[in-house]
Amino acid sequence: MNHRRDTFLVVLVLFATIWYPMEQVKQTDRIRGTSNRVYIRYWGPTFFSLEEMGRIAEDVEQYMDERRDLYKISSVMTYCRRGYFNLRVSLRDNPNQEWWYVIYAWGREKLGFPTDRWLTRKAII
């Protein structure tokens, strides 16, 4: 019975060494919200003209541009239609996405020496 338990533990550890790094690798094609783009649609009154929606879109785009460094934004794009406009914000990639850096940052945080953190996606939205 001991050999089965030992074998199971070895297999479990080997699986963890494969699974954990793969979960930490940047993957933008999954449906887990890891994409660096945020899409927002702003609805206005139906009687707003294209020009009026365009002015509001410019104000929102300017607001986002002013906070480019805070939110780590690489680009902002708006496109207008009558009654609404869409805002697409592309965020910069976090340079510390390698699997080993996640462990390093966790260890530093536990020791009381946290690394600089980016805002989370939830905080940005």
Image (cartoon, grey):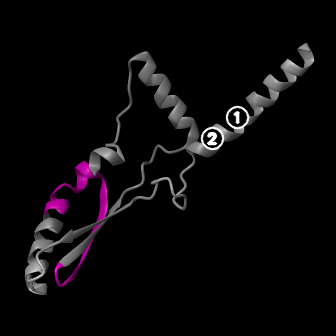
Is 81 one of the magenta-colored residues? yes
In the image, what residue occupies the spot 50% across and 45% down? 97
| Local crowd size for mark 1, using a 10 Å CA cut-off: few (<14), some (14–19), many (≥20) | few
- 88 relative position to 24: left or right: left
Q: Position of residue 10 (x, y in %)?
A: 81, 25
Q: Quadrant of the N terminus?
A: top right
Q: Is residue 122 above or below residue 89?
A: above
Secondary structure under the numbered disc 2 in the rendered image: helix
Q: Quadrant of residue 2?
A: top right
Amino acid type at circle 1 is Thr
Q: Are marks 1 and 2 in contact (CB under 8 Å)?
A: yes
Amino acid type at circle 2 is Pro
Q: Position of residue 96 (x, y in %)?
A: 46, 43
- 11 relative position to 30: left or right: right
Residue that sits furthest to the front in the current view: 46
Magenta residues span 63-83
Secondary structure under the numbered disc 1 in the rendered image: helix
Q: Position of residue 26 (x, y in %)?
A: 53, 51
Q: Which residue, given by chain and number where applicable, does mark 2 sit on?
A: 21
Q: Which residue, given by chain and number where applicable, does mark 1 sit on?
A: 17
In the image, what residue occupies the spot 10% across and 72% down? 56
Q: Which of the two residues, 37 or 3, is positioned nearer the viewer here? A: 3
Q: Is residue 31 above or below residue 114?
A: below
